[in-house]
């Protein structure tokens, strides 16, 4: 395709995007959209990895365009809580991921998402698993509770058979979730499929670490609010011959990560050399499967929008990406934040919490105002009613557990988010056609 043909094609695409945005009342600034598309196209001609000289952060070129430098200081204050330190035979590289790495476009970020590569250099895989178990448990115990944080949950280990835990049936291959008391004890209790009790020790879970993730509730004094902070781990074992093997069998790509420390770049580059030459195509294929999943029988159109945005950025469909980019800035998307923070407040209010009730009540007030700003009519009345009940309990004016209000408020918020993204994604013909094509592939 010649430069002139490509330019005309982009003009046609942005014209269609502007038309769809106008019909739905989405405030898409034409000049800003064109500038962003031009920046994306310019970056595509450079290398995949970009280093910001001033801040020292680095990441994939398309991800770095969505990072807001003004947010870096806030995320770096969380590093002592969420980040792992190097130790003998253990090297680490901490990054932002998810909406935290796209802070320039998410007007209402809900969580502080981190991602960390942990490379363990020992003689055998078994030694690597044992050392990982020690590293994760040490981190969990050290950050169990403090003035500005509280450990929520750790995912470590994989069930080798179907079990029931806390009344929930879990299939073989499901990740093990550890609550703080279970981490302290070093064991958890489950019921097997034949009804007998089974105790799983932390050391037993280490045999197949699987999906490893830690979650905390953290206070942000600057914003006067609480948030969920998580750290997803990608753990690799480096054998004496230099071979690098992911402990969960899958090496995560780096297309949504912004690494926070320049001196971790050598480790990052050593590990990602193991990615296949068609890593982008594989990653896009993985995202497409998730798009089909989240647009199916139990839809989450907010997740569909996030994945489509990343697909379109990586496949040079910049007009569609620019359109979705603006959707994240609309008031209704604040309900995504509402849904996430409701559960954060519930966890923060548990017995022994280090957080003051005034902070939690103030945040409930913020959520109520977000709901009022985003909704109207019956939808507004329903979710605000549930949030007011939650606020009363946080303030100590209600004795009930509030579980029903929490679940109902989350469901109402997500219903509104689903409706918002579903309508606006399908309004753009190019996106509607793309979704139809993906669905047809799986039929």
Image (cartoon, rainbow, N blue to C red):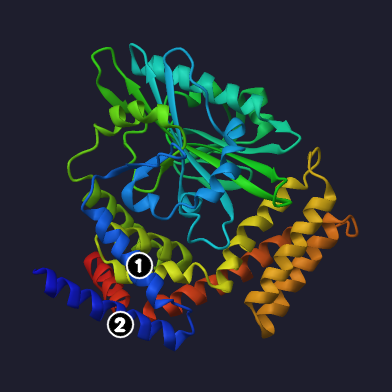
Looking at marks 2 and 1 on the same chain, the residue that comes earlier in the sequence is marked by 2
Which is more toward the observer, 215 or 359? 359
Tell me residue 221's x, y (percent): 73, 45
| Residue 251 on image: x %, y % | 32, 36
Kindly state the secondary structure of the residue where label 1 is placed.
helix
Q: Which residue has dot 2 on it? A: 15
Residue with the most extreme right position: 397
What residue is drawn where x is 67% and y is 51%?
Answer: 344
Point 67% across, 69% down: residue: 370
Residue ID at (54%, 44%): 72
Q: Is residue 395 above or below residue 332?
A: above
Res 197 seen here: no
Q: Which mark is residue 35?
A: 1
- For the residues marked 2 and 1, what is the alpha-carbon distance in whole angstroms? 14 Å
Give the tally of numbered discs: 2
Q: Quadrant of the N terminus?
A: bottom left
Q: Quadrant of residue 110?
A: bottom right
Seen from the viewer's position, the closer of residues 215 and 326 is 326
Quadrant position of the C terminus in the picture: bottom left
426 sits left or right of 406 in the view: left
């Amino acid at each position: 395709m010649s430069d002139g043909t490509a330019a005309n094609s982009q003009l046609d695409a942005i014209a269609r995007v502007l038309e769809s945005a106008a019909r739905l009342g989405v405030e898409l600034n034409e000049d800003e959209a064109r500038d962003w598309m031009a920046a994306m196209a310019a970056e595509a001609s450079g290398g995949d990895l970009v280093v910001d000289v001033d801040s020292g952060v680095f990441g994939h070129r398309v991800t770095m365009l969505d990072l807001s430098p003004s947010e870096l200081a806030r995320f770096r204050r969380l590093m002592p809580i969420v980040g792992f330190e190097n130790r003998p035979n253990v090297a680490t590289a901490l990054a932002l991921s998810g909406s935290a790495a796209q802070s320039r476009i998410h007007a209402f970020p809900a969580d502080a998402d981190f991602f960390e590569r942990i490379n363990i250099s020992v003689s055998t895989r078994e030694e690597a698993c044992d050392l990982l178990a020690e590293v994760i448990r040490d981190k969990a115990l050290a950050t169990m509770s403090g003035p500005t944080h509280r450990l929520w949950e750790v995912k470590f280990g994989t069930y080798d058979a179907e079990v029931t835990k806390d009344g929930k049936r879990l299939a073989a291959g499901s990740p093990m979730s550890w609550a703080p008391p279970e981490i302290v004890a070093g064991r958890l209790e489950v019921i097997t499929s034949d009804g007998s009790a089974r105790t799983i020790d932390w050391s037993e879970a280490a045999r197949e670490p699987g999906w490893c993730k830690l979650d905390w509730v953290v206070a942000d004094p600057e914003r006067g609010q609480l948030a969920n902070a998580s750290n997803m781990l990608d753990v690799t074992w480096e054998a004496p011959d230099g071979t690098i093997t992911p402990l969960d069998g899958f090496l995560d790509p780096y297309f949504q990560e912004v690494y926070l420390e320049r001196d971790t770049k050598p480790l990052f580059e050593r590990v990602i050399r193991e990615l296949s030459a068609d890593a982008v195509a594989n990653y896009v294929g993985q995202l497409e499967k998730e798009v089909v999943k989240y647009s199916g029988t139990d839809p989450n159109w907010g997740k569909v929008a996030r994945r489509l945005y990343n697909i379109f950025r990586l496949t040079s469909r910049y007009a569609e990406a620019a359109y979705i980019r603006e959707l994240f800035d609309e008031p209704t998307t604040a309900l995504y934040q509402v849904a996430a923070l409701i559960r954060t407040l519930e966890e923060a209010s548990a017995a022994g919490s280090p957080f003051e009730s005034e902070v939690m009540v103030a945040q409930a007030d913020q959520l109520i105002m977000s709901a009022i700003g985003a909704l109207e009519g019956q939808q507004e009345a329903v979710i605000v009613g549930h949030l007011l009940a939650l606020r009363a309990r946080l303030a100590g004016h209600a004795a009930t557990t509030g579980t029903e209000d929490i679940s109902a408020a989350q469901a109402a918020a997500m219903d509104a988010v689903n409706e918002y993204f579903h309508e606006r994604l399908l309004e753009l013909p190019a996106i509607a056609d793309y979704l139809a094509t993906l669905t047809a592939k799986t039929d």
